[in-house]
Image: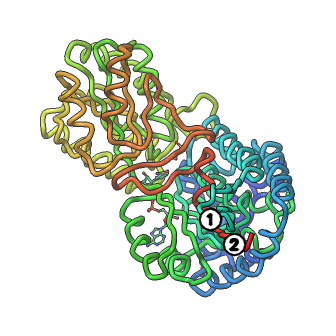
């Protein structure tokens, strides 16, 4: 039983956030199943910047997930039967409502996740861009006729919605990771049961409010918050679910992969990364520093495509480290809602401890802390953005995804040396390198084992390009026209007797 004082404090935190919203109805403390707002608020959602409890949400489980799947199953035939244009128009309306409410959505996002408001606005905008893009793609789910090998027969390949889809999303991008799954699913004619991360469910619930307003019928989109493993098991094993889209850690992705094999379900896995960021001696060093800053410190380093290990060629090593560290030292740490703050809190203390483990291991191996290196004087889960020099290539920070504001800079000799180090990882989500030599650009882009490569850019994410990884970074692609493939099945039809 929540002590009265804590309950009152929680109530005041929720009402204070609500009072700052233009549309207070976007802040929800219930789940959304079959068009109804259900469940009993019991699980606290906290603001990582100050630890205050924002609101409580339901802690649902397997039975509720099953009810949500059954609601999605009931809603599927009618939703799939709408014309592509009708679904497109509803998605377009959802896009318009997201943009109209972008400030509120960004404030909710920063309050539950911690990123600076400017970044939250950017995330809401790209989240909306996925909805806009797939509102257009809804009308381009083309099939094909195939030159026949029998004079009396005609061959077709048609693309049909796969059916009920499960979606499980992470806390680091609580808005765009949801629309990157839900919008292509709805565009294709599928229905969805979504389980957002318990740390950041409010963005998902706010998106559901707007989807409802846009005319998404009941049962088409369902949101279940609560105990992840049992809910995930239902989504992976329920016979009505035909696809599961997951974004999160590779370890959890492997659990879902095993569970989905029971019913031979199609899976989309967007998993962990360990992106190399390489600066060759022919690079524009200032551009490389700018690219490293955005790639490494976006969302305080809590981004799957963050530069996780930086490599600088011998000749420009010292210059790159000096310029990078100078910029990093100027970053402003604080509550994401404060003007000018570029580094908010990490999601929790566990994240801080991982950063500290990686720093300690690197320093033990001879690395030097050039800037940062310790918890911020602000306390809680604020950490000083950090640059390490003279890091060993086999340091823990180069082997594991740090998911924090830590840039280890490793020295390298030549192309062969650095490509070998880049590819010596079980992960292959994103890679980045800076060079102005056209031959080197082609050679290195083709040699890197990752699903995405940024050349002379540290920010590559866009709704029009295929996002995804190779090796243990995942299966499938999200965004771009390829993002529809997850949600459709190809059916071959032979029409004989012609
Ligand atoms: N490839 C991408 O596009 C991408 C994008 C964002 C984050 N990520 C990765 O996600 C990780 C960080 O996010 P995270 O900490 O939320 O990941 P996580 O795997 O711990 O959690 C992701 C989601 O899975 C749920 N979950 C946890 N255990 C589960 C289980 N046994 N069954 C079903 N669901 C379960 C969580 O509640 C959450 O909703 C990092 O590794 C990051 O690289 C990848
Ligand atoms: O964490 C990884 C997400 O995919 C973030 S983004 O798509 O690069 O913005």
Q: Is residue 301 left or right of residue 197?
A: left
Secondary structure of the residue carrying tag 1 is: loop
Total numbered badges shown on the rendered structure: 2
Examine the image and state in which quarter residue 55 appears: bottom right
Indicate the quadrant containing the N terminus: top left, top right, bottom left or bottom right.
bottom right
Residue under label 1: 150
Pick the front one: 332 or 378: 332
Residue 292, percent across and down?
A: 41, 27
Spatial distance from mark 1 to mark 2, Cα to Cα? 8 Å
Q: Is residue 360 left or right of residue 339?
A: left
Mark 1 vs mark 2: which is more N-terminal? 1
Residue lying at 74% horizontally and 78% vertically, measured from the top left: 38
* Residue 35 in view: no
Secondary structure of the residue carrying tag 2 is: loop
Q: In the image, which disc is placed on residue 496? A: 2
Q: Answer yes or no: do the residues labelled 1 and 2 have beta carbons within 8 Å? A: yes
Q: Residue furthest bottom?
A: 63
Examine the image and state in which quarter residue 53 appears: bottom right
Residue 375, percent across and down?
A: 37, 42
Residue 323, percent across and down?
A: 36, 16
Pick the front one: 474 or 264: 264
Q: Residue furthest left?
A: 365
- 134 shown above or below 62: above
Q: Ligand 1 within 8 A of label 2's CB?
A: no
Indicate the quadrant containing the C terminus: top left, top right, bottom left or bottom right.
bottom right
Categorize mark 1 by other alpha carbons within 10 Å: few (<14), some (14-19), many (20+). Answer: few
């Amino acid at each position: 039983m929540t002590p009265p004082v804590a309950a009152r404090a929680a109530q005041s935190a929720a009402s204070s956030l609500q009072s700052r919203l233009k549309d207070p109805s976007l802040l929800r403390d219930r789940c959304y199943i079959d068009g109804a707002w259900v469940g009993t608020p019991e699980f606290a959602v906290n603001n990582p910047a100050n630890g205050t409890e924002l609101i409580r949400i339901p802690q649902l489980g397997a039975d509720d997930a099953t009810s949500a799947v059954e609601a999605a199953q009931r809603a599927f035939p009618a939703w799939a039967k709408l014309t592509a244009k009708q679904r497109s128009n509803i998605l377009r309306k959802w896009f318009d409502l997201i943009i109209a409410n972008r400030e509120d959505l960004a404030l909710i996002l920063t309050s539950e996740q911690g990123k600076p408001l400017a970044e939250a606005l950017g995330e809401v905008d790209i989240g909306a861009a996925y909805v806009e893009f797939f509102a257009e793609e809804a009308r381009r789910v083309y099939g094909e006729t195939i030159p026949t090998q029998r004079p009396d027969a005609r061959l077709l390949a048609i693309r049909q919605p796969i059916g009920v889809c499960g979606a499980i999303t992470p806390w680091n991008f609580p808005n765009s990771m949801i629309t990157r799954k839900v919008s292509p699913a709805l565009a294709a004619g599928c229905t969805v049961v979504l389980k957002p991360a318990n740390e950041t469910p409010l963005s998902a619930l706010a998106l559901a409010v707007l989807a409802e307003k846009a005319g998404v019928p009941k049962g088409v989109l369902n949101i279940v918050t609560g105990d992840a493993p049992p809910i995930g098991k239902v989504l992976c094993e329920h016979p009505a679910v035909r696809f599961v889209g997951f974004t999160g850690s590779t370890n959890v992705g492997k659990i879902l992969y095993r569970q989905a094999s029971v019913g031979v379900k199609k899976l989309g896995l967007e998993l962990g990364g360990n992106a190399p960021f390489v600066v060759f001696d022919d690079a524009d060093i200032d551009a490389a520093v700018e690219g490293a800053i955005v790639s490494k410190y976006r969302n305080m380093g809590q981004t799957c495509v963050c530069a996780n290990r930086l490599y600088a060629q011998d000749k420009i090593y010292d210059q790159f480290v000096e310029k990078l560290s100078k910029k990093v030292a100027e970053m402003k740490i604080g509550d994401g809602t404060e003007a000018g703050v570029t580094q908010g809190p990490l999601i929790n203390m566990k994240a801080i401890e991982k950063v500290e483990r990686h720093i300690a291991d690197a320093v033990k191996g001879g690395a030097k802390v050039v800037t940062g290196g310790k918890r911020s004087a602000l306390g809680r889960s604020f950490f000083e953005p950090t640059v390490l020099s003279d890091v060993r290539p086999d340091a823990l920070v180069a082997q594991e995804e740090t998911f924090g504001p830590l840039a280890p800079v490793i020295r390298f000799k030549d192309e062969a040396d650095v490509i070998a180090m880049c590819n010596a990882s079980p992960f292959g989500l994103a890679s980045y390198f800076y060079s102005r030599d056209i031959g080197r650009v082609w050679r290195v882009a083709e040699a890197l084992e990752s699903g995405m490569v940024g050349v002379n850019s540290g920010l590559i994410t866009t709704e029009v390009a295929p996002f995804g990884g190779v090796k243990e970074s995942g299966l499938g692609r999200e965004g771009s026209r390829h993002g529809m493939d997850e949600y459709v099945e190809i059916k071959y039809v032979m029409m004989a007797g012609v």
